[in-house]
Amino acid sequence: MSRLARSLVGGGIIAEDLEPESGVGRPRQILSAVPGARHVVGCKLTGDTAYGVVCDMFGEVKATARAALPARRPDGAVSVAETVKIVAQVVGKLARKVPPLDGIGVSVGGVVADRAIVREGTFLGWRDVDFATPLRDRTGLPVVVTNDVTALAREELWFGAGRTHSTFGLITVGAGIGFGVVREGVVVDELIDNGHLLAHAPIDTRGPRCGLGHTGCVAAYLNRDDIERHASAAAHRPVTFAGLVQARAAGDGTAAGLLDGAARALGHLAATFAGALQTTRIVLAGEDVAAIASSPAMTDVVADRLRPGPDEAQRCTLDITTAPLTFNDWARGAAVVGIQNVLGAL
Ligand SMILES: [Zn+2]
């Protein structure tokens, strides 16, 4: 047995068995991972809630818990100290269901540095917040903090798209547009632009404006805030994304037009991302993606983008799948990062 395997067996992470029916020579040793060897909490923080799950080493969810975060203070930020306390309580609740715990992974939307510091916590109003240290001090467990889409990309690499593709892209559509990049089996931890360049790529110079004033960029069609702003302006009353989806189901043409526009933008985005990343595999996720990707407009755009010219011999296909994700699935992504951290695999 190699030294590595011996240390893994010593740590209880893998188990050894002898091959039952051995032929000639020494019986072979079979090594297999022990799923229950480690348990890690994953916690996804939205702007108002902490969603927690506890997973085993195979990423299987063993228990869930959640708690509301405190309301934003007058300065627009959610209290960090209170959030640490609440996450620690969620961890405590999960620990009582599946003891003992080996670590914590926390994911947030925005920019995270050094797997600990929330540089920009988009939905929490945080700037340069060290979230890992106080949570570690409070729980006594190793803590890793990560961008939420990066966490999903790590989860996909181990348990999803990564099983067949070493390079793939992840696009999330919900409160904001997010990107996960996996190249040759390596997850890009920090995007250089937090996805800004792709999110504001132009689609139609006669299109609607995004919040930054671009005409007809991806975000102008696809970003939830922008869709709601355009829908509200058209209806002369506040319209939410959920309301828009209901209106489409009831036969509202304006709602269908806006959602088809979002679907076309998502098709363009997926095709452009695949081309830039040189992968045939794109995973779509996020709260709003199912309602948008269900429009045939998305597949039509992708088919049109793939259509070869008369002299082009090279054919390409794209494998685009939708994984509508609940917040517990996001928390599972954070747990997978926690598992990788505990195993020293980050
Ligand atoms: Zn824009």
Image (tube, rainbow, N blue to C red):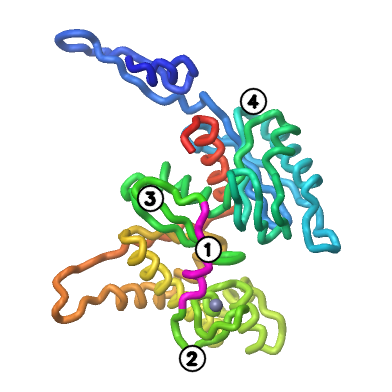
- Please state which of residues 99 and 315 is positioned toward the viewer in this rendering: 315
State which mark lies toward you, 3 or 2: 2
Q: Element under label 1?
A: loop
Q: From this viewpoint, is residue 251 visible? A: no
Q: Nearer the viewer, residue 322 or 280?
A: 280
Q: Is residue 139 shown in magenta?
A: no
Q: Secondary structure at mark 4?
A: loop
Rendered view: 139 above or below 201:
above
Q: Which mark is residue 104?
A: none
Numbered mark located on residue 99 in the image: 4
- Point out which mark residue 161 bears: 3
Q: CA distance from mark 4 to mark 2?
A: 58 Å
Q: Earlier in the sequence, mark 4 or mark 1?
A: 4
Mark 3–mark 4 Cα distance, whole angstroms, equals 31 Å
Considering every residue shown, the one lying at the far top of the view is 25
Identify the mark at residue 193; answer none if there is no mark: 1
Nearest to N terminus: mark 3 or mark 4:
4
Q: Could you give the CA–CA distance between mark 3 and mark 2, rounded to whole angstroms?
A: 36 Å
Q: Amino acid at mark 4?
A: Pro
Amino acid under disc 2:
Arg
Residue 204 lies, in percent from the top left, at 45, 85
Q: Quadrant of residue 232?
A: bottom right
Residue position for label 2: 206
Q: Residues within 10 Å of mark 2 (few under 14, many from 20)?
A: few
Q: Say which element carries label 3.
A: helix
Q: Which region of the structure is painted magenta?
A: 190-201
Q: Is residue 246 above or below residue 76?
A: below
Name the magenta segment's main secondary structure.
loop
Residue 9 lies in what quarter of the image? top left
Dot 2 lies on which element?
loop
Identify the residue shown where x is 73% and y is 60%.
Answer: 125
Q: For the view shown, which residue lies furthest in the right direction?
A: 74
